[in-house]
Amino acid sequence: MTAPIKFSASLGQIPVDQLVTTAQRAEELGFYSVTVPDHLDDQPAPLIGLTAVAASTTTLRVLPLVLANDYRQPVVLAKELATLDAISGGRLEVGLGAGWMTSDYDFAGIKNDSPGTRIRKLSDSVDIITALMRGEQVDHDGDFYSVHGAGGTPHANPHIPLMLAGGKQKMLTLAGQKADIIGINPGLTAGVIDERAGQDATLERTDQKIQWVKDAAGDRFDSLTFQTRIHLAMITNDREAVAAEMAPLLGISAEEALASPHALVGSVEQVVDEVQQWRERWGFSYLSINADAMEDFAPIVEALDGK
């Protein structure tokens, strides 16, 4: 059965005083969810912001995309997530990540371990958080956390979807083993977004990433939801000109930019066709765009709603 297409709007660049009204507009336009990233700049705090959104909407799902594991202790985070799920009436999706942005670590004075160490630490944390959100008592002695007798989350829910996102093999292997939603990203091991991320966002690289997930997921693969974060979303009748302008900044060709699942540029008809091709090739059925593109993409959301 073909998965229906779902759209999400990122509120990361929305001023705090416009957060709720923007989310309410996303709900009106038929968006499935809204997201808030997790960085230590002037963006809204994800869990507080999404709690305000959940209390002010009725059908919209809320997703931190994604919470950096190094910024939080897993037992405390599990309680906060369970509380948000209760407030939202079961509309939470949990997005967790290993952390990547060097400037966040530098600013906060947090130790920035190697990517492999951060991913192993995240794996430990995922086991603790998911068990607690299911209402289980946890006795866990891992490489990074020692938790004994922890429990008592305010709203146990065994069905909260878990999202893990990444762009390299170790992270996508973990996602294939443990997540319900797999976010496919450009590789960001450099700790910054530059032309290296663009070169890791091509059609061929995406094929490889899906294969890594498939190898790790085994029999779970067909039940997974695949998500992509679209960093350039634009409705235009001259997609080639836009691609020619943007591609040099990404270190790739215009053709590679247009084929990337992290850019969605063209007329309404072209974008609808492109999204359907992504679903057929890679299984992408969950697309996240910036909130400033919501109005322009409303016809695409309507055209693909439930399809």
Image: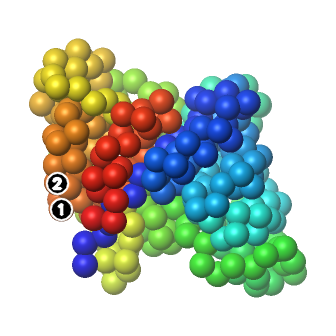
Give SS at disc 1. Answer: helix
Q: How far from the left and from the top, in percent, is residue 18?
A: 67, 32
**Residue 98 visible somewhere in the drawing:** no
Dot 1 amino acid type: Glu
Q: Which residue is at a point 33% across and 83% down the rendered structure image?
A: 219
For this rendering, which residue is in front, 115 or 135? Answer: 135
Residue placed furthest toward the front: 28
Position of residue 48 in the picture relative to residue 229 (left or right): right
Position of residue 144 in the picture relative to residue 137 (left or right): left
Query: Which of the 4 image quadrants contains residue 134?
Result: bottom right
Q: Which residue is at a point 34% across and 59% down the rendered structure image?
A: 305
Give SS at disc 2. Answer: helix
For this rendering, which residue is in front, 22 or 201? Answer: 22
| Residue 277: assigned label | 2
**Other-residue count near label 2 (Cα within 10 Å), few / some / many at <14 / 14–19 / ≥20:** few
- What distance separates the C-alpha of mark 1 from that of mark 2? 5 Å
Q: Which part of the image, by quadrant, shows the N terminus?
A: bottom left
Q: Which part of the image, by quadrant, shows the C terminus?
A: bottom left
Image vertical order of residue 33 relative to residue 297, above or below? below
Q: How far from the left and from the top, in percent, is residue 84?
A: 75, 61
Q: Which residue is mark 1?
A: 280
**Residue 302 visible somewhere in the drawing:** yes
Query: Which of the 4 image quadrants contains residue 78?
Result: bottom right
Q: Which residue is at a point 16% across and 18% down the rendered structure image?
A: 241
**Other-residue count near label 1 (Cα within 10 Å), few / some / many at <14 / 14–19 / ≥20:** few
The reply to whether callout 1 and callout 2 are in contact (CB within 8 Å) is yes
Dot 2 amino acid type: Gln
Position of residue 51 in the picture relative to residue 122 (left or right): right
Q: How far from the left and from the top, in percent, is residue 263?
A: 29, 36
For this rendering, which residue is in front, 82 or 194? Answer: 82
Q: How far from the left and from the top, in percent, is residue 35?
A: 57, 47
